[in-house]
Image (tube, grey):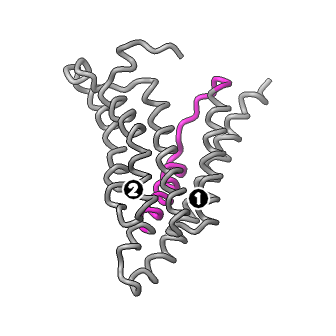
């Protein structure tokens, strides 16, 4: 994929690259002290803005000229940045005992499998759209990890309620995202099997 300056130098791409560059710092804070979760939460929330900024240029030509536009690079770099950040947060949570090792391990395995399927499909020229179920499942598991970190700041009696609920939601999210990854793999194979 050859990138032009106009393709690479966009405001949303700058935000995505800044998030990628800041990931080690944010995760180091979380690794050292799970009570620093508000920093990670703000960082994760910033992920919403690159897509919003990219789409703003589609309806406003003046903004597009200023760099608010979608790009092929951003379409690939943003999900990769999200996966790197989420995997690092899950690793920090597992290290601190905030995220149960079985749930974290299953989540990391699911993310690795989904990434491998995406790379495999795209290497063969098969473009896959993210399904609503896949997006919602990822959202559910990410929110569950956030709740597990927030629970570190709660009183023990509150924590006894929040943790089991968050773990159940996280497990359901990982299961749903695993099924979505399977469907991406299955649908990506169909072009190979057609005569």
User: Is 135 part of what is drawn in magenta?
Assistant: yes
First in sequence: mark 1 or mark 2? 2
Residue 169 in sight in this render: no
Residue labelled with disc 1:
174
Quarter of the rendering occupied by the C terminus: top right
Spatial distance from mark 1 to mark 2, Cα to Cα? 25 Å
Q: Main secondary structure of the magenta part?
A: helix
Residue at 36%, 78% in the rendered image:
154
- Residue 110: give x, y in percent of width and height: 63, 51
Residue for point 35% across, 36% down: 18
Question: Which residue does the image show at 46% across and 43% down from the upper left?
Answer: 82
Position of residue 124 in the picture relative to residue 176 (left or right): right
Region rendered in magenta: 123-147
Q: Residue 158: x and y, percent?
A: 39, 83
Queried whether the magenta region covers residue 112, the answer comes back as no
- Could you say which quadrant of the image residue 39 lies in? bottom left
Mark whose residue sits in front, 1 or 2: 2
Instruction: Please give the residue where the numbered disc 2 appears in the rendered image.
Output: 29
For numbered disc 1, what is the local secondary structure? helix
């Amino acid at each position: 994929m050859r990138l032009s300056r106009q393709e690479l130098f966009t405001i949303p791409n700058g935000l995505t690259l800044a998030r990628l560059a800041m990931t080690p710092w944010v995760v180091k804070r979380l690794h050292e002290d799970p009570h620093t979760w508000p920093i990670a939460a703000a960082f994760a929330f910033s992920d919403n803005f690159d897509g919003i900024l990219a789409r703003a240029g589609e309806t406003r030509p003046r903004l597009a000229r200023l760099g608010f536009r979608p790009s092929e690079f951003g379409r690939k770099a943003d999900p990769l940045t999200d996966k790197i950040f989420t995997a690092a947060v899950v690793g920090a949570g597992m290290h601190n005992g905030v995220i149960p090792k079985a749930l974290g391990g299953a989540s990391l395995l699911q993310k690795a499998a989904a990434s491998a399927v995406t790379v495999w499909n795209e290497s063969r020229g098969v473009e896959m759209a993210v399904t609503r179920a896949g997006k919602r499942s990822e959202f559910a598991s990410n929110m569950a990890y956030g709740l597990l970190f927030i629970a570190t700041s709660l009183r023990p009696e509150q924590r006894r309620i929040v943790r089991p609920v968050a773990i159940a939601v996280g497990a359901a999210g990982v299961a749903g995202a695993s099924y979505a990854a399977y469907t991406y793999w299955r649908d990506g194979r169909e072009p190979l099997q057609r005569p």
